[in-house]
Amino acid sequence: MGGKTIMIGSMYGDQLYVQGDASAPGVLLRELGLDYRGYNAEQMTALSMEQAEVLAPADILLSLASDQEATTRLENFAVFQNLPAVKARAYAPVELLLSNAFVDNFGPLSAPYALPQLAEVLTGLAAGQGKQLP
């Protein structure tokens, strides 16, 4: 991962939820030795989509895509498309099952499922093999 900064921002409904330092995925990524950067010290912060530029420090950007319609709106938003990680193809929406295993229900039973997939997603993003947006 070469010290690449990871951030997580997800659109759900009309809100952009940005994971903070105290979030479960943030804690897990740091415990795995990765450079996770939360938006703030909280678990999560709700913002408007127009504030997507708060994700600009990310070298790698994940989106927990539990609301596909909202995720599509975010991906079609020009400010989001111009984020450095998105332009570098270091962005990926994380599908619902992996998202649930990684964020909401991470533990001994989900780890064998979630960790290999998460490692594959992150190494692909570090190599610029993420989702290409218009």
Image (cartoon, rainbow, N blue to C red):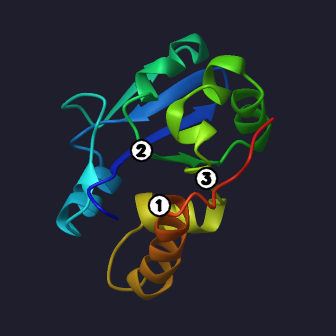
Secondary structure under tag 3 reads: strand
Q: CA distance from mark 1 to mark 3?
A: 11 Å
First along the sequence among labels 3 and 2: 2
Q: Nearer the viewer, residue 66 or 130?
A: 130
Residue 126 image label:
1
Q: CA distance from mark 3 to mark 2?
A: 12 Å
Q: Amino acid at mark 2?
A: Asp
| Image point (26%, 56%), residue name | 3
Q: Quadrant of the N terminus?
A: bottom left
Q: Amino acid at mark 1?
A: Ala
Q: Position of residue 65 (x, y in %)?
A: 64, 48
First along the sequence among labels 1 and 3: 3
Q: Position of residue 106 (x, y in %)?
A: 37, 70
Task: From the image, state whether disc 1 or disc 3 is nearer to you.
Answer: 1
User: For the residue carrying disc 3, how many other residues have a C-alpha within 10 Å: few (<14), some (14-19), or many (20+)?
Assistant: many
| Image point (61%, 32%), residue name | 11
The relative height of residue 113 versus residue 44 in the rendered view (above or below) is below
39 relative to 77 in the view: left or right: left
Residue 92 image label:
3
| Image point (33%, 52%), residue name | 4
The relative height of residue 56 versus residue 126 in the rendered view (above or below) is above
Task: From the image, state whether disc 3 or disc 2 is nearer to you.
Answer: 2
